[in-house]
Amino acid sequence: MALADLPPSGTDPATGAAVVRVLSYNIRSMRDDPAALARVVRACAPDVVCVQEAPRFPRWRRRAALLARLTGLTYVAGGATTCGPLLLASMRARVVRTREVLLPRTPGLHRRGLAMAVLRFGAASPGAELAVASCHLSLAAAEREAQTGLLLEHLGALGTPHAVLAGDINEGPGGRSFRQLAAQLQDGWAVRPWGSELTLPPAAPRTRIDAVFASRGVEVLGCGVPLGLPGVTQADLMAATDHLPVLAAVRVPAG
């Protein structure tokens, strides 16, 4: 599949199934070049952005609003209230409900959280409902494993059969947490690789610690780092933040 051929957003009028584009992006609290960051996001044309390391210090809401304005998206959930993970969505998505979760704190380590929402695409009833979660797991292996189990529990508790989980896993596909996620969900890159695989560091990526996962009933149409996607320049990717983004297109059944 050529980069330009990643399916666009849309809804099948006959079946109600929706193609949804999901972008996962660690933005390092917007400490780099916000204009370059916005250009990358806009070029990916996402319906949902799962942000990690969103602004979370004083005036964080103003910074989150700036990010939404620059990218042409709307704020959904998360930010300082979830210690970094945040959700943005296009006007195509209708928010059914949101959930913000603070995970248990380990003394001496940065607290982690989850930004979650159920979004509806297409007709108001039944439409295609998709649970979405943005996460940024711990740097410590033992805490990361515990967080993985809690993450899967909270995702299931949203009560929606179709789900996408995206984030900075802080380990590669060989790690125990990554393998636990891939055992219960589809690893987008492994199922339908598109674009590039490695996400860190941006200048000479050597590892894949950022990923998009989907539940079994969701069809992955393509997933990967959008290197070479029209409108996504190497200069902007280098200037935007210290991670490369992961873009996925998924087909979500109606009902």
Image: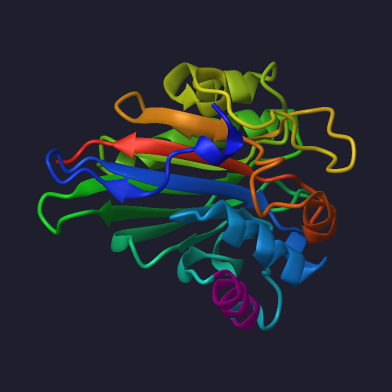
* Left or right placement of residue 141 versus residue 49 in this view: right
For residue 46, say whether it is visible.
yes
Residue occupying image coordinates x 57% and y 52%: 44
Residue 187 locus on image (x, y percent): 52, 24
Residue 222 locus on image (x, y percent): 50, 31
Q: Quadrant of the N terminus?
A: top right
Q: Is residue 128 above or below residue 210?
A: below
Q: Main secondary structure of the magenta part?
A: helix
Residue 199 locus on image (x, y percent): 75, 37
Residue at far right of view? 204
Range of magenta residues: 62-71
Q: Nearer the viewer, residue 230 or 118?
A: 230
Residue occupying image coordinates x 64% and y 32%: 195
Q: Is residue 127 above or below residue 71?
A: above
* Left or right placement of residue 233 versus residue 162 in this view: right
Q: Nearer the viewer, residue 131 or 113?
A: 131
Q: Nearer the viewer, residue 166 or 126?
A: 126
Q: Nearer the viewer, residue 134 or 120?
A: 120
Q: Quadrant of the C terminus?
A: top left
Q: Is residue 64 inside the magenta stretch?
A: yes
For residue 104, say whether it is visible.
no
Residue occupying image coordinates x 56% and y 40%: 4
Quadrant assignment, res 51: bottom right
Quadrant assignment, res 148: top right
Residue 32 locus on image (x, y percent): 83, 66
Quadrant assignment, res 12: top left
